[in-house]
Image (tube, coloured by chain):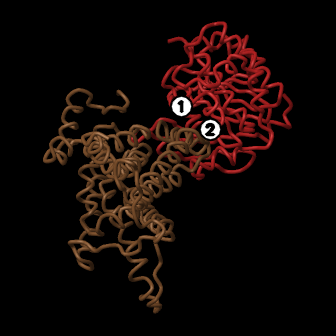
Chain colours: A brown, B red
Amino acid sequence: MDPMIRLILAQGMLGLNNGVFYAMLSLGLAVIFGLLNVVNFAHGALYMLGAFLALILYSYAGAWVGLDALHIGFWPALILAPLLVACFGMLIERFMLRRLYKLDPIYSLLLTFGVTLVLQGLFINFFNASGTPYPGMPESLRGVVNLGFMMFPKYRLFVIIFSIIVCFAVWYMIERTRIGSRLRAGTENPELVKAFGINVPLMVMLTFGFGTGLAGLAGVLAAPIYSVSPLMGANLIIVIFAVVVIGGMGSIAGAVLTGFALGLVEGITKVFYAPAANTVIFLLMVIVLLVRPNGLFGRQS
Amino acid sequence: MSTTTLTKPMLKIENLHAWYGESHVLHGINLELAEGQLITLLGRNGAGRSTTLRSIMGMVDRRTGSIAINGEEFITKPAHRITPDGRIGFCPEERGIFASLTVEENLMLPPAVGADGMSIEELFEMFPNLANVRKRMGTRLSGGEQQMLAIARILRTGARLLLLDEITEGLAPVIVKTLGRVIRDLKSRGYTIVLVEQNFRFAAPLADRHYVIEHGEVIDTIESADVESSMDRLNHYLSV
């Protein structure tokens, strides 16, 4: 195989691997924004929380209950951590965000920004600010797979496939099922949905929990790849917001596709001009804002 | 209409006041209707007819007074309990068809409130036009199709008390005629109906009683038997 093509494919795979996280996080943001009209700035911090919960479950939880040999591993964490993050999200919605719906959306953005700072501060206080490796990667996902053009870590391949399945499942649920049609209706006209006898405040709380749970899930998936650090979400959320601006708020499929595509773009840029890889997304954001201010998949209003 | 049914009304509203923010819109509405009856709320735009329906639905900022459905007080109920507990079907003035949902999804959206709702097949029989567009998005329907969908949607839930707001507004005469047939059919099936209507010629032959609303109050009540002798009064109320 031509080495150039091989290099593009290899960087493309690594880019896709980042794209997975862009897609899962912007998906959660889009779900939340759609129904609540809230820009959840805390999304990055909740992703960080998910990763830390995985780490805590493996390295600390056992010792806390007096069972030093107990390590709650990756697979249970993949279920438990997102659920815990979702519960935390629902508490934020129920006791904080709910009071702000009648105000300008900037207030909920500021509130979630505050939540971000508190969470980051807490974890910096108790954990190593520069990051802790997650030791719980399951044995079955260690090692590499030969993709023909590169040796690719098995775990990363798992993350890509798993995330594509999750994104598709969420898209399907929202666009094709009864629950999803209620969510979409609630996005359009919550007052009428309430008048039909649907408990909209409950639906809003569960949706926020679901969106934040997705961030937690992404955090668990990220833990074995990146080191678990209190600022891992802060670094990512800036890129995620660029992804959301490019994709356009409010479209589920748009958020997912843009996330994957921008990961690829970033990876492939590395082949041609590596220093631009970190900026290319923001460059695209500027262009999209100038040409299509509502984003590639955004609704024109 | 026998007086025995009137002594035990299905819907009885007493001294209903309602507010949007600071503005006081209803100033003590009183009305009642028995099971199987159809009443209309007549009046000029902005008189408070739609607000009366929206108050029953809990869609105003504040409401006081009494709204009793089958003897149960509804004034303090949270909005999402009103439809299921009262077995109400509400058809809002702007029709409320969800643009991002297909016809079928719109139809299936409201949860059932009783066991004896119409089946999809029955509804498509009643509104054949809808059967042909069942996969179409809500935005891409004509006004008449939207109105039929808005009515069909609440008939599926098993609602027994229908609150219909301006269902003939802006529709072609042939569709208005179809809707008249539908309402007559529903009445013969025993539904209890409150009709907010601008089109008196549409409403007159259907109603048991007319309430004339002005400035958020009922200023006159006219039984259907007295319509003919009250035409002068009615014309006066409804003229712009």
Q: Which mark is residue B98?
A: 1
- Residue under the image location 50 percent in, 21 percent down: B45
- Residue under the image location 18 percent in, 40 percent down: A272
What is the residue that sits farthest to the front in this orientation?
A: A1
* Circle 1: element type: loop
Q: Position of residue B221 (x, y in %)?
A: 67, 25
What is the residue that sits farthest to the top in this orientation?
A: B173
* Figure quadrant of residue B56: top right
- Residue under the image location 83 percent in, 25 percent down: B188
Q: Is residue A89 above or below residue B28?
A: below
Q: Position of residue A64 (x, y in %)?
A: 42, 88
Q: Is residue B77 left or right of residue A2?
A: right
* Circle 2: element type: loop
Q: Is residue A159 above or below residue B201?
A: below
Residue behind mark 2: B109
Q: Chain of mark 2?
A: B
Q: Quarter of the image containing the N terminus of chain B?
A: top right
- Residue under the image location 67 percent in, 51 percent down: B73
Question: Which residue type does callout 2 highlight?
Answer: Leu
Q: Position of residue B26 (x, y in %)?
A: 51, 36
Note whether residue A178 is visible: yes
Disc 1, disc 2: CB below 8 Å?
yes
